[in-house]
Amino acid sequence: MKLSPTQIEQYQEEGYVMLGRVLSDAQLEGLRQEEARFREARGVNNERPGTHFFSKMAPYSPVLREVITRGAHVEALPQLQGTPNVAFRHDQFVTKMPDRNSQKSEFPWHQDEGYEPVTPPLGVTVWMALDDMTLENGCIWVIPGSHKQGRLEHEARGEDGYLTLPIEGDGVPAIMKAGEAIAFTGLTLHRSKYNRTEGIRRAFFVGYTDAAATYQARNMAEPKPVVGSPHAWVVCGSAPMPSKR
Ligand SMILES: O=C(O)CCC(=O)C(=O)O
């Protein structure tokens, strides 16, 4: 899929754009089956309310790799990233089990690059809905234009390990159908609220960067190139070759 000039402008100005349907029926079904496989392997069921992450699963699944490298959204990545050279660097399923008043299924306001800075900043996150996303089941919310503030200082929140920051107001809910996606920048503030339904709420989240980017996780003394780090690889164009390894 190629994005229109209006969609690109919205992405640049507001820090997000709705991509519409990106998954084929077969890809949607394949991702749902893989999510169920990983969820079962981790012992997550209705007795465990909350938001559960099954991260860095691409090495275990050709279904995931196909979506990450050849999904309909991939053609739009150079437009979003602003370079022909784009690397995949992170995948995760984000599954919200029914909250049932446990107040555990919220994921507070954050920038993805608040967790792990990337240079140059502004990677692209493509967040795909595997179920219809509603206000009731914990759709994602974004704050239009928030990426223009740059990287903000996040604080660790309580026991759940989330980083967050104080935000006033609600932002905009990304209501969408299963198989559709939203793209947002690594600096766009976003969050999701509780899953107040009795159904499961599943999403597949894929992070991309400029193929020449470096990243620095919280436990790393120095930044490292994205391409060459575990699980990352080029999906559009090419990456600069290191002079030696
Ligand atoms: O899927 C969600 O509820 C939020 C996921 C998210 O914001 C993230 O993983 O950064």
Image (cartoon, grey):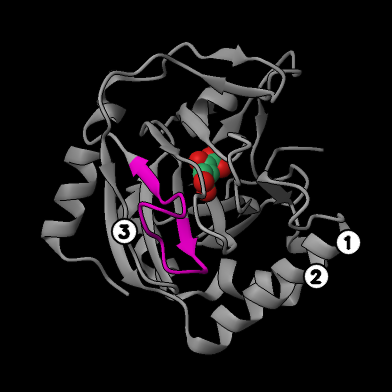
Tell me which numbered mark, 3 or 2, is placed earlier along the sequence. Answer: 2
Residue ID at (60%, 53%): 98
Determine whether the residue tagged by mark 2 lies in a helix, strand or loop.
helix
Asked whether, in this view, residue 124 is left or right of residue 51, the answer is left
Find the magenta span and give its range.
Answer: 127-141
Residue neighbourhood size for the residue with mark 1, other residues' Cα within 10 Å, grouped as few (<14), some (14–19), many (≥20): few
Q: Which residue is mark 1?
A: 41
Place of residue 213 in the rendered image (x, y in percent of width and height, measured from the top left):
54, 36
Looking at this view, name the residue that lies furthest to the bottom.
Answer: 26
Q: Is residue 240 above or below residue 38?
A: above
Q: In the rendered structure, does residue 45 fall within the stretch colored magenta?
A: no
Q: Which residue bears the numbered disc 3?
A: 175
Graded by Cα atoms within 10 Å as few (under 14), some (14 to 19) or many (20 or more), the crowding at tag 2 reads few
Q: How far apart are labels 2 and 1 at the CA level?
A: 6 Å
Q: Are marks 3 and 2 in contact (CB under 8 Å)?
A: no
Disc sitting over residue 37 in the figure: 2
Would residue 216 be seen by someone viewing this image from the given angle? yes
Q: Nearer the viewer, residue 124 or 202?
A: 202
Where residue 201 appears, x then y in whole percent? 55, 60
Q: Quadrant of the N terminus?
A: bottom left
The percent position of residue 17, horizontal first and vertical second, equals: 26, 53
- Asked if residue 133 lies in the magenta stretch, the reply is yes
Task: Give the dominant element type of the magenta stretch: helix, strand or loop.
Answer: loop
